[in-house]
Amino acid sequence: MSVDAIGLSAGLLKAVKACGYKNLTPIQQQAIPIIRSGVDLLASAQTGTGKTAAFSLPILDELAKNLTSSQSSQLAGSHNIKALVLTPTRELAAQVAENMKAYSQFLPLKVGVVYGGGKMASQTKMLKQGVDVLIATPGRLIEHLALRNVELAQIHYLVLDEADRMLDMGFLTDIEKLLLSIKHKHQTLMFSATYSNKVKSLAKHILTTPKTLGVTKQNTTSGKVKQAVYWVSEARKRELLSELIGANNWQQVLVFAGTKESANILAKELKLDGIKAALCHGDKTQGARNKALADFTEGKVRVLVATDVAARGLDIDDLAYVVNFHLPFLAEDYVHRVGRTGRAGKSGMAISLVSPKDERFLGNIEQLIGRQFERIIVPGYELKRDEFLEHTQAVEKRTSQNRYRATQAKNQAVAKKSTKKKAKGQKYNSQIKKKR
């Protein structure tokens, strides 16, 4: 469906076309009419499918129409916060703000953003001057609320973007505090990459008779992304990574490391191999993270080494390669990492370097996405005999444990059924005695 077909106002349509939009993605086609109807929404789609535009376009369109209408002319200069978008990370907040500013460039609306790591003074000044749309991370917004820098009473739209990630990061209490500050009757939109039990519970608590929208099967990766697993010892991962980058002439590679410390070591070793690398993780200042991303996007560095702080917030056009140097602890994070490539229907490649100690994480990922990976062994990188034996023993141990758990669960189910049957019989006998 063309962007011309959904009846956007002239200024918004002009901006959307200036951003290069021609056709709507599936999530946009389905979500926009629902949001326009005014009902609450719980929506899920893979990363890179256009969720930001799906909620931004109808909200901005409605706000712009209200501000320019004769009935609301007195509010045109007030710039009270009318729409609030909550995101889990600084990167995602900055990305959403950038997109919404681009969409609203020809509209009489102000868009602002606040997140941890940014300067409080400049954020306070922006909030005091007034904004119509605010994008924020929960923790920093709570700080501004405590300092009375911001007023949320007049909000008409509340968006929880990447709701599952916010809950995983422990923001539930902050979200509940923020909800108490919103006095006006509002429309709530929850967008999430996955429907976890936590997401369903929160949705039940804060959404009113919502529409539920799932564009794609949950916990799946894009069919446009080729995925491969390279079987290698832990000690030789960096060596293999350097060889893959050099031999295949990869120019833009996002590499995920397990910890900040391992990311620092990996970036240093890649530089020693002659591969320019930058870092993006929680210990870096926001300015340093922005510079690293800019250098990577502009091709000044070949590799960006990141932790999962970047898994949801990075939006890099035409990113061809994602490498899991360490597999994530949570299988769902694999889906988000892989989603950094193959965005907006483009193709991409996701590589995972897997050692024997990673096998249990890989097993969880395979179970989650419903796929078994072939273990590719690059000549010269075969496992040593003791490593292979260690792996075999670990697999046998897990298999034995799984069989034990399965048998235990079966026995518990049988015992539970027997108990219910016995209780039912006792109840029946009691009723017979009473009748006598």
Image: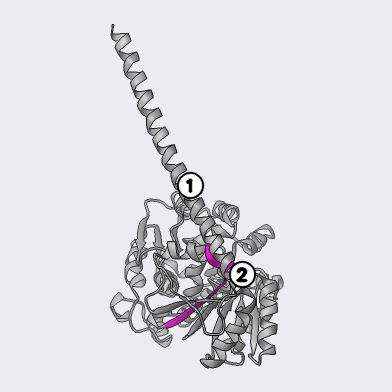
The residue stretch that appears in magenta = 348-360
Task: Between residue 324 and residue 144, name the one nearer to us.
Answer: 324
Residue, disc 1 = 405
Image quarter hosting the N terminus: bottom left
Three-letter code, disc 1: Arg
Task: Between residue 269 and residue 239, name the one nearer to us.
Answer: 239
Three-letter code, disc 2: Asp
Is 125 situated left or right of 333 in this image?
right
Q: Quadrant of residue 136?
A: bottom right
Q: In the figure, 1 relative to 162: above or below?
A: below
Residue 358 magenta? yes
Residue, disc 2 = 386
Whole-percent x, y for residue 217 in the image: 36, 64
- Crowd band around label 1 with a 10 angstrom C-alpha radius: few (<14), some (14–19), many (20+): few
Residue 207 circle label: none
Q: In the figure, 28 relative to 407: above or below?
A: below
Query: Residue, x 62% and y 74% (percent of image)?
Result: 234
Is residue 211 visible to us here? Answer: yes
